[in-house]
Image (cartoon, helix red, strand yellow):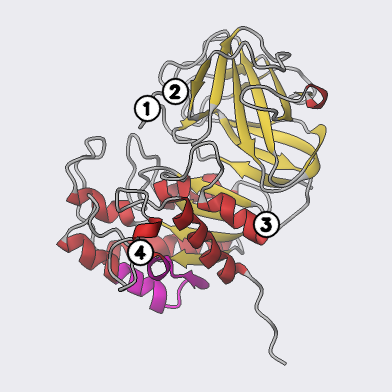
Amino acid sequence: MFTTAWTASPQLPSTGFTPNWSQEGFWRHSLRQVVRLGAGGDRVRIRLSNAYGTSPLRVAGATVARTARGAAVRPDSVRRITFAGSPSAEVPARGTLTTDAAELALEAGESVTVTLHLDAVTGPATFHAQAFTTSYRGAGDLLADTGGEGFGEATESWYFLSGVDVSAGRTDGVALLGDSITDGFGSTPGADRRWSDALAERTGRPVLNAGIGGNLLLNDSAWYGEKGIHRLERDVFAHAGVDTLVVLLGLNDIGFSETDEQPTYRPAPRVEVGELIAGHRELIRQARARGVRAVGATLLPFGGSDHWGERAAKVSHELNEWIRRSGEYDEVADLHRALAGPDGSDALCGAYDFGDHLHPNDAGYAVMAEVVAAVLRPRAACS
């Protein structure tokens, strides 16, 4: 029985926030990607997504190995990945593929490296824009390159890789559905300091990060992924072992209409709190239909940011009060109160502010993880 130990939510190829290879794609390349696991096991398999591909994706070969440093892997740990017994495969256009399992003992919190040899033209690549860790590219078949010398190019995005499963047999996974705050913007790149990482460390449970920078609850966009109410099935419930969903969405729906600095999302409609509540209720409905516990997180303080304004203040206050008091979520994680300044203001506490008054830093993400961990801890029985 397999448990999903790592995920990245697929996105449409786009220019993105930082330089990436999604629009050009790959041809006669090897692609090496490093991910950190939220669970351990004796066998491992990977999931590939061609969700936004218009033609089949040919994978000429693949390996998985323990990460050494940078693009290097531990030579004694390299395992060839097969596809229904074959060393190569095609992922259908708009489709996904799960590989066979390889024998490799891995521990929770360990980093693994997945290498894909892409010998045919891929076309624009389904990817995850903001990895906050480095991926590598080199010419030719580099599956056997354990030292990483052939990987001369680097980017901070993930491509085609949407999940890693291990033979843990666990059913206590926690999935986080959110935007750039869940994705980890503002955390130290390469250090695994997102709040999903911190939450996994505090709870010992697999934590799946289904955040997308800029994501909205109610509307699709070119850079920021499909709306939350539509991608929940693919990005959360399609993975194995999830029993809890934590929702932190709505800030961009509210804030994009306040700023002129988001040209990739125009027009930005002004949404009312009733629309946002309806969106949250749809997420709750989908979770309940799956027997998954739904935890609602209040929006973080964002006063003074480019998303802030009189109208944003009103709608965000109303949404947070509904999350706190309606009783519709199974549990509530009040992140707003935990990260607000000492006077309970609408601004992030300075010690937790990455610098844009919108995103937390490493310390802020650690506080978020502690608040949610407290909600997830089993309650003592009344005696």
- Seen at 66% across and 14% down, the residue is 60
Left/right of residue 65 with respect to residue 321 in the rendered view = right
Left/right of residue 323 with respect to residue 134 in the rendered view = left
Circle 3 residue = 205
Left/right of residue 337 with respect to residue 239 in the rendered view = left
Q: Specify which label sits upstream in the sequence, 4 or 3.
A: 3
Q: Marks 4 and 2, how far apart in space?
A: 34 Å
Compared to residue 86, the image places residue 209 above or below, namely: below
The tag on residue 212 is none
- Seen at 32% across and 62% down, the residue is 301
Q: Specify which label sits upstream in the sequence, 3 or 1.
A: 1
Looking at the rendered structure, the kind of residue marked 4 is: Ala
The tag on residue 278 is 4
Q: Marks 3 and 1, how far apart in space?
A: 33 Å
Circle 1 residue = 14
In this rendered view, identify the residue nearer to me: 296 or 99.
Answer: 296
Mark 2 and mark 1 residues within 8 Å of each other at the beta carbon: yes
Compared to residue 39, the image places residue 151 above or below, namely: above
Dot 1, crowdedness within 10 Å: few (<14), some or many (≥20)?
Answer: many
Observer-side mark, 4 or 2, equals: 2
Q: Marks 2 and 3, how far apart in space?
A: 32 Å
- Seen at 39% across and 79% down, the residue is 325
Badge 3 marks a residue whose secondary structure is loop
Badge 4 marks a residue whose secondary structure is helix
Magenta stretch, residue numbers = 318-338
Looking at the rendered structure, the kind of residue marked 3 is: Arg
Left/right of residue 351 with respect to residue 56 in the rendered view = left
Looking at the rendered structure, the kind of residue marked 1 is: Ser
Badge 2 marks a residue whose secondary structure is loop
Query: Which image quarter holds the C terminus?
Result: bottom right
